[in-house]
Image: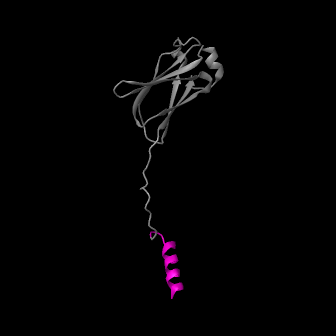
Amino acid sequence: MKSWILLGALAALALPGCVADDGPPDVAVVGDGVLDVDWTIGDAKDSRDCSDEGADSIDVVVTTAAGDVVGDFNAYCEEFVISIELAPGTYYGDATMLDASGRARTTPVDLGRFVIYGDDELDVPIDFPLDSFY
């Protein structure tokens, strides 16, 4: 008789939903998302265009919907992509090519309004037309 009780107890433990879990409930944690600004110069990704146009780096400024600056992010021109980690929310941004001294080489390119969701990756492609360079 004892073996039947023990066998029944073991079988109950093997059935899904029959095991008691006294631990804390699972909580979904939402992390930051990533904005990838992917740029071209004259619709091309040619590092020679960076040097030909005197562009050393890109400057991406991200703001909130209220106009508060979230950050000013930089990458070398030849990288042609910058990844920016942002908390979930609604943002605006613009990008400008800079020379080696940090002076603007182009008119700003508007990234427009974008939304970052938790654990999200958003790709925003932009182009700096050749006539946007000073």
Q: Residue at x 47, y 19 (%)?
A: 108
* Residue 5 image offset from top left, x and y in percent: 49, 83
- Residue placed at 50% from the left, 72% from the top? 13
Residue lying furthest left: 66
Check the image and report above or below for 118 versus 46.
Answer: below
How many badges with numbers are in the image?
Answer: 0
The outermost residue toward the right is 48
* Horizontal relation, residue 121 to residue 68: left or right: right
Position of 127 relative to 114 (above/below): above
Residue 57, quarter of picture? top right
Q: Nearer the viewer, residue 33 or 58?
A: 33
Q: What x and y, as percent, mark residue 86?
A: 46, 33
Colour option used = one colour
Left or right: 100, with 28 as reference point: right
* Main SS of residues in magenta: helix
In magenta, the rendered stretch is 1-17
Judge whether residue 115 is colored magenta.
no
Q: Residue furthest front?
A: 2
x, y percentage for residue 60? Answer: 49, 23
Kindly indicate the quadrant of the structure image that contains residue 17: bottom left
Q: Is residue 3 magenta?
A: yes
Q: Position of residue 66 (x, y in %)?
A: 33, 26
